[in-house]
């Protein structure tokens, strides 16, 4: 046992907290993707196509991960 006692927290409260955590993570991931995109465009405007496609792939992965948290 972890040493923690149940203090009467309902399942609804636990679900609400988990939902809030997922929402916060989702927002953080979307902010991260936007910051990476802006940084890549401003710092590396003439980057090679392979580099740009790699960045776009990473951004899509981050955004898809964020979207999956809403499910």
Image (cartoon, grey):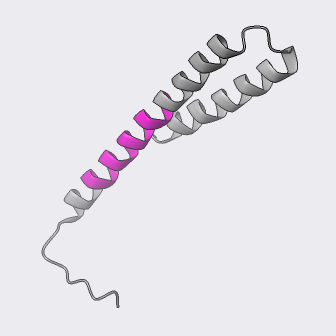
In this rendering, position of residue 5 left or right of residue 44:
left
Tell me: residue 8, above or below residue 59: below
| Percent coordinates x, y for residue 52 in the rendering | 77, 19
Tell me: residue 25, above or below residue 51: below
| Front residue of 12 and 49 | 49
Tell me: residue 18, above or below residue 40: below
In this rendering, position of residue 9 left or right of residue 52:
left
| Front residue of 68 and 59 | 59
Tell me where the magenta segment starts and ends, as one range. Answer: 16-30
> Is residue 70 visible to us here?
no
Disc tally is 0
Quadrant of the image occupied by residue 33: top right
Q: Is most of the magenta stretch helix, strand or loop?
A: helix
| Percent coordinates x, y for residue 23 in the rendering | 36, 40
In this rendering, position of residue 27 left or right of residue 56:
left
Residue farthest to the top? Answer: 46
| Percent coordinates x, y for residue 2 in the rendering | 34, 86
User: What residue lies at 79% left-to-right and 8% top-to-bottom?
Assistant: 46
| Quarter the N terminus occupies | bottom left
> Is residue 32 visible to us here?
yes
| Percent coordinates x, y for residue 11 in the rendering | 24, 64
Magenta-colored stretch includes residue 27? yes
């Amino acid at each position: 046992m972890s040493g923690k006692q149940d203090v009467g927290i309902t399942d609804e409260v636990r679900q609400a907290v988990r939902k809030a955590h997922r929402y916060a993570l989702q927002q953080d991931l979307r902010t991260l993707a936007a910051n990476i995109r802006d940084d890549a465009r401003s710092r590396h405007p003439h980057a090679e196509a392979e580099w740009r496609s790699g960045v776009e792939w990473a951004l899509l992965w981050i955004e898809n991960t964020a979207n999956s948290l809403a499910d």
